């Protein structure tokens, strides 16, 4: 093989490699773009069936629902849970758990009537398809502390000690808020 | 000997080193400043530097991280490799990250070595005994990249002894896949990552590697008051990682292996600090790697950007 042929072959191989790399790049970008679009648009079938923000509470298994809070009688649990709520949850659920643009009120009746075990189950598993991440990265006792705090809140519409009414999700949002928890209307 | 070499390096190299590291750190600080428009939020960050657990970034949150690795080098010069990382939670099941890498080799030079774009997809909606996450990364780096973010194939210490001027001429375009498996039980996190990498340039075979880790917070219950030094803010553990050869020669032969204790300090002021001294377990490994990192998470970054560009009313 002459030197000229060698150079031509090398150039050709380089071009092939470049083409292959470019194709791989384009494919990667396309796959990710499609995924991004799907992430924004897709509404799961189960969400279509029941669009209530609080529907996930009903999905907790019986065993989880029946679990008692081991820190129920810990006098510090609610205070420590309040600190954890402020650090990890208030950004989406609001400083007073009244709900926000991204997540619903935790003062609402379905949450306040849920058993501690149900709330613990939701915290542990999240509601991934609606934007709530799993919080099992917090150790179990910390999750129970948060549950204890949530159960210590005054439910929506009930009177506070000073006679004022606690915030109510329905009052704050006459029309349901568009949040990552709730699918967009079709 | 190596420390003597470090002290003996020329002022010009020190200036270059400081300049690039300052640039990289400035980039980190600049983004932290911009992200300051979003609300900082305390994260419960894992202490791992190489291993991934199954926890993704919270949706709409941006985590800005700066990491540094000091490595000893037999038959060459010690080095400091560093990278800035931007991790964004696109959804609760998808996190995307962009890395910019650089390195300084003592008595040699300082250079930018490339970028990486990684994506992690949570495969199951709920928590299970073992939680799988799919990891896909595209990286475009030069042969001088030394961040050792993952060890795969037959990566050995001597590969890193090549002078920068030569090593930078090699350009790698790699696709990397990982299956991340992770469990959390009684406060412990156990994570295992299996790595498969294909270099798209040339006819390189698939290369394999692994990383695994275990960690636990020092206290499982939160204290009543906000505090910096409470046990709940510290997570300690250990990680082990190394290569598993390639398609033609799978196994531990001619691979490097590391064991590294890790600790993370999640400060109530929204910052996380990580430290990890790593030790080579065989003659193919760097004897010592010292890694540290600093990160800050900003919640609602996505919304802030939408507001800035007028997509959403404040």
Image (cartoon, coloured by chain):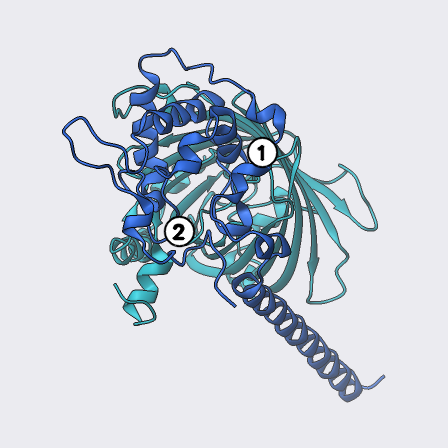
Viewer-proximal residue, B274 or B133? Answer: B133
Numbered disc 2: what chain?
B
Residue plotted at (39% across, 46% down): A104
Q: Quadrant of the N terminus of chain A?
A: bottom right
Residue plotted at (27% across, 40% down): A95
Outermost bottom residue = A4
Q: Which mark is residue B188?
A: none
Chain identifier of the blue chain? A
- Residue at which label 1 appears: A60
Q: In the rendered view, does A26 fall on the left or right side of A172?
A: right
Q: Residue B29: x percent and y percent?
A: 28, 53
Q: Residue B135: x percent and y percent?
A: 62, 51
Q: Residue A83: x percent and y percent?
A: 30, 28
> Do dots 2 and 1 share one subunit?
no
| Tag in front: 2 or 1 | 1
In the rendered image, the vertical position of residue A115 relative to residue B24, given as above or below: above
Residue plotted at (56% across, 26% down): A65
Residue plotted at (55% across, 68% down): A37
Q: Which quarter of the figure has residue B254?
A: top right
Viewer-proximal residue, A22 or B186? Answer: B186
Q: Residues within 10 Å of mark 1 (few under 14, many from 20)?
A: some
Numbered disc 1: what chain?
A
Q: Is residue B156 visible?
A: yes
Q: Residue A24: x percent and y percent?
A: 67, 70
Local secondary structure at mark 2: loop
In the rendered image, the vertical position of residue A186 relative to residue B131, given as above or below: below
- Residue at which label 2 appears: B61
**How many marks are shown on the rendered structure?**
2
């Amino acid at each position: 093989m002459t030197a000229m042929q060698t150079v031509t072959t090398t150039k050709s191989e380089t071009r092939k490699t470049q083409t292959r790399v470019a194709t791989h790049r384009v494919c990667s970008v396309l796959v990710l773009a499609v995924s991004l679009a799907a992430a924004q648009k897709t509404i799961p079938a189960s969400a279509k069936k029941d669009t209530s923000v609080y529907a996930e509470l009903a999905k907790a298994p019986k065993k989880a629902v029946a679990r008692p809070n081991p820190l129920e009688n810990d006098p510090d649990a609610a205070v420590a849970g309040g600190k954890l709520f402020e650090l990890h949850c208030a950004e989406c659920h609001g400083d007073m758990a009244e709900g926000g643009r991204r997540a619903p009120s935790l003062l609402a009746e379905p949450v306040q009537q849920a058993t501690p075990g149900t709330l613990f189950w939701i915290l542990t598993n999240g509601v991934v398809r609606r934007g709530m991440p799993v919080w099992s990265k917090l150790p179990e006792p910390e999750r129970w502390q948060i549950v204890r705090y949530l159960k210590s809140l005054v439910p929506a519409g009930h009177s506070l000690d000073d006679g004022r009414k606690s915030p109510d999700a329905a009052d704050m949002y006459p029309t349901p808020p568009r949040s990552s928890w709730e699918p967009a209307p079709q | 000997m190596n420390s003597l070499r470090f002290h003996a390096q020329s002022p010009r190299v020190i200036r270059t080193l400081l300049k690039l590291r300052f640039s990289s750190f400035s980039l980190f600080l600049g983004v932290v400043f911009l992200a300051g428009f979003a609300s900082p939020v305390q994260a419960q960050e894992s202490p791992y530097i190489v291993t991934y657990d199954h926890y993704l970034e919270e949706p709409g949150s941006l985590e800005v991280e700066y990491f540094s690795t000091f490595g000893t080098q037999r038959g060459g010069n010690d080095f400091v490799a560093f990278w800035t990382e931007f991790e964004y939670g696109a959804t609760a099941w998808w996190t995307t990250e962009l890395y910019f890498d650089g390195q300084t080799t003592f008595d040699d030079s300082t250079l930018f070595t490339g970028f990486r774009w990684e994506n992690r997809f949570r495969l199951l909606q709920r928590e299970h005994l073992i939680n799988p996450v799919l990891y896909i990364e595209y990286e475009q780096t030069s042969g001088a990249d030394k961040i050792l973010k993952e060890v795969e194939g037959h990566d050995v210490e001597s590969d890193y002894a090549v002078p920068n001027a030569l090593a930078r001429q090699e350009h790698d375009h790699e696709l990397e896949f990982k299956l991340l498996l992770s469990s959390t039980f009684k406060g412990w996190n156990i994570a295992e990552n299996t790595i498969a990498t294909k270099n798209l340039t040339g006819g390189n075979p698939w290369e394999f590697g692994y990383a695994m880790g275990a960690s636990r917070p020092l206290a499982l219950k939160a204290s009543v008051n906000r505090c910096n030094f409470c046990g709940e803010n510290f997570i300690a553990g250990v990680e082990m990682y190394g290569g598993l050869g390639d398609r033609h020669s799978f196994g531990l032969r001619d691979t490097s292996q590391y064991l590294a204790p890790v600790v993370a300090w999640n400060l109530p002021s929204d910052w996380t600090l990580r430290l990890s001294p790593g030790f080579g377990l065989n003659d193919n490994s760097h004897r010592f790697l010292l890694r540290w990192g600093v990160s800050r998470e900003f919640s609602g970054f996505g919304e802030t950007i939408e507001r800035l560009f007028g997509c959403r009313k404040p």
